[in-house]
Amino acid sequence: MPDNPFRRTKPEPVPPVAASAREKTLPLRINGKAFFHNGDPEMPLLWYLRDVLRLTGTKYGCGIGACGACTVLVDGKAEHACMLPVKSLAQREVTTIEGLAGKDALHPLQESWIAEDAIGCGYCQPGMIMAAAALLKRKPHPDDADIDALPNLCRCGTYPRVRAAIARAASAPVEGKK
């Protein structure tokens, strides 16, 4: 059977680029891997993730840091990738939705999102999950007011299910602790 010309294939991520002594490069650490950016240091992280590395889980929503669709973790804290120039990320650890899960299992937030059916159309959900991960790192047992204070917007109105998913993840047993 011939290949379907309409089948979409995900492009392979660009491999880390070895920095030569003559090139101006910016070292980046994303999802535990080293990368070097040779382009415009003012490029927003969002476009570096999506266009250069082909990590498309982080979404473009508003471009002004108001909606949260582009939320990633930078050193464990929620940040809007559309507002962060790559030059501000040297010596920092960036985690995207693609890097949140372990090698063999989903992150507890991802599991709870599925269990609570917290996904509407799904567009804003990666950013919501990343914001929730930062919240749980900062406050392992948040109350409803803490969860409701997350700044992420969802046009589908899944907020009650998102709240339930975060509460479920917060009450899940932590691996390795008894």
Image (cartoon, rainbow, N blue to C red):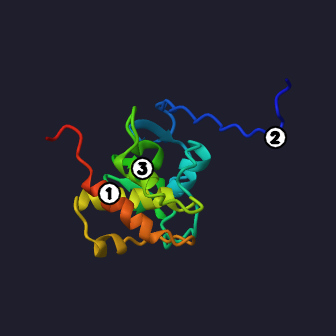
Secondary structure of the residue carrying tag 3 is helix
Cα separation between marks 1 and 3: 11 Å
First-in-chain label (1 vs 2): 2
State which mark lies toward you, 1 or 3.
1
Secondary structure of the residue carrying tag 1 is helix
Q: Pointer 1: what residue?
A: 168
- In percent of width and height, residue 105 lies at 39, 37
- In percent of width and height, residue 90 lies at 38, 48
Vertical relation: 69 (above or below) 10: below
State the residue in front, 139 or 96: 139
Cα separation between marks 1 and 2: 39 Å
Q: Are marks 1 and 2 in contact (CB under 8 Å)?
A: no
- Residue 104 visible in the picture: yes
**Residue type pointed to by label 2:** Phe
Task: Give the residue drawn at x 46%, y 31%.
Answer: 21
State which mark lies toward you, 3 or 2.
3
The answer to whether 113 appears left or right of 149 in the picture is right
First-in-chain label (1 vs 3): 3
Task: Give the residue drawn at x 58%, y 36%.
Answer: 13
- Residue 70 visible in the picture: no
- In percent of width and height, residue 153 lies at 49, 71
Residue 110, labelled with which disc? 3
Q: Are marks 3 and 2 in contact (CB under 8 Å)?
A: no
**Residue type pointed to by label 1:** Arg
The answer to whether 124 appears left or right of 141 in the picture is right
Task: Give the residue drawn at x 41%, y 56%.
Answer: 130
Q: Are marks 1 and 3 in contact (CB under 8 Å)?
A: no
Residue 6, labelled with which disc? 2
State which mark lies toward you, 1 or 2.
1
Residue 123 falls in which quadrant of the image?
A: bottom right
Secondary structure of the residue carrying tag 2 is loop
**Residue type pointed to by label 3:** Gln
